[in-house]
Image (cartoon, grey):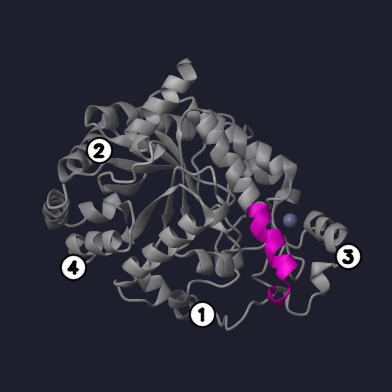
Amino acid sequence: MKRLATILSVLMLFGMAAASCGQREEPFRAYAWMSGKVSMTDEVLEDYFSRAADAGLSGIFLECHGGYPEVLGDSTAFRDSAALVILRRAVPVAQKYGLELHAWMWTTNRCEHALLEAHPDWYEVNGLGESLAEIEMYNRKHYRFLCPTHEGVAEYLKDRVRELAEVEGLTGIHLDFIRYPDAILPYGLHESRGVVQDKVYPQWDCCYCDQCRAAFKAQTGIDPLELEDPTACPEWMQFRWDAMAKLADGLLAEIRACGKVASAAVFATPEESKKLVRQDWVQFRHADALLPMIYYSSYAQPREWVETASREGVEALAAAGNMARLYAGVPVPRDGDFRQCIALARAGGAHGICFFSLEGVARNPEHWTALKEALAEIQ
Ligand SMILES: [Zn+2]
């Protein structure tokens, strides 16, 4: 009963109770992502969180394990002590200002050296047979994606979830990078990254590790490495969508089992996500909230795309019977027009919005006022 009570109180906090009674109407909520560091003092947290609460945000997604995770203590240990320090310091400050606090962690993209040392075989392999444990895809040191078909990967990540859930008072756990590497980068980034991706090329197409090849061959009789055009093989695409959805859903279910709100940051629309990063997020069925990162400039789209992309996501979730809330992930508008961003997300049917990032809001003092005014109008 105690666990049930905890889960219910957490769901109430996240605005989920109305949904379970069949009432979809609830206030539009606004959040922000923020990066966390061990060195972040109480004063810094006080400053950010007090302003966030004053502006009308409901909560913060605080990054506690990113591309360059900090290491405290034993560098060969898997336990993420740095993440726990970051969260334990932030929770009381968030509570003081009535903010939800969600632990934001990178998921399949894991860069801890201890893991790389212990399990280099767990990392994805591209169509040229190169392991992401060894190469730097897109010249990024932190591009180290784990393969979802390895049982050990799922267990390792569940351990990390359970570890974060130990933090008393934490509202939820938020999965980022729960996907394959970019087979194709979002279209607005090709020129700046110096890539030509008019179709899928093998150096960016994953996972061709021995285990995935064997599993797919047992299922279909096909070695995916021999496919001339892997994207033209529906079974091979489906295999990867399913593998990632299974991993994601298992982790989201684990978050819920720990009494925390389960959410994930996903690519902008269901179709683009499947195409670019093999992420079929409509099948993330144990998510309480999904946050498509509708970073319109990265997709060479105008800001109005926030509405279109939100609608596509909301409709796809409804069609699949997935009850997750959709919060539109939107970059902080340089012109300070938070009102327009919120209006677009609402028009697209989103249940809320999440700005990237809180630091981006803080960079311009006028942003706090503009955000507060925009949020006050919809209360
Ligand atoms: Zn694999």
Q: Secondary structure at mark 3?
A: loop
Q: What residue is shown with label 3?
A: 221
Task: Tell me which numbered mark, 3 or 2, is placed earlier along the sequence.
Answer: 2
Task: Tell me which numbered mark, 1 or 4, is placed earlier along the sequence.
Answer: 1
Report the mark closest to the observer, 3 or 4: 3
Between 268 and 282, the residue placed more toward the observer is 282
Report ligand 1 position as a quadrant: bottom right
Residue 236 location (% of width, % of height) = 73, 66
Q: Residue at the location (61% across, 52% down)?
A: 245
Is 154 situated above or below 1?
A: below
Task: Tell me which numbered mark, 1 or 2, is placed earlier along the sequence.
Answer: 2
**Mark number, residue 44:** 2
Q: CA distance from mark 3 to mark 4?
A: 55 Å
Q: Residue at the location (34% across, 29% down)?
A: 91
For the residue marked with disc 1, what is the amino acid? Gly
For the residue marked with disc 3, what is the amino acid? Gly
Direction from residue 177 to residue 10 in the image, left or right: left
| Bounds of the magenta segment | 231-244
Q: What residue is shown with label 1?
A: 194
Q: CA distance from mark 4 to mark 2?
A: 25 Å
Report the mark closest to the observer, 3 or 2: 3
Residue most toward the top?
1
Direction from residue 240 to residue 55 in the image, left or right: left
Magenta stretch containing residue 236, yes or no?
yes
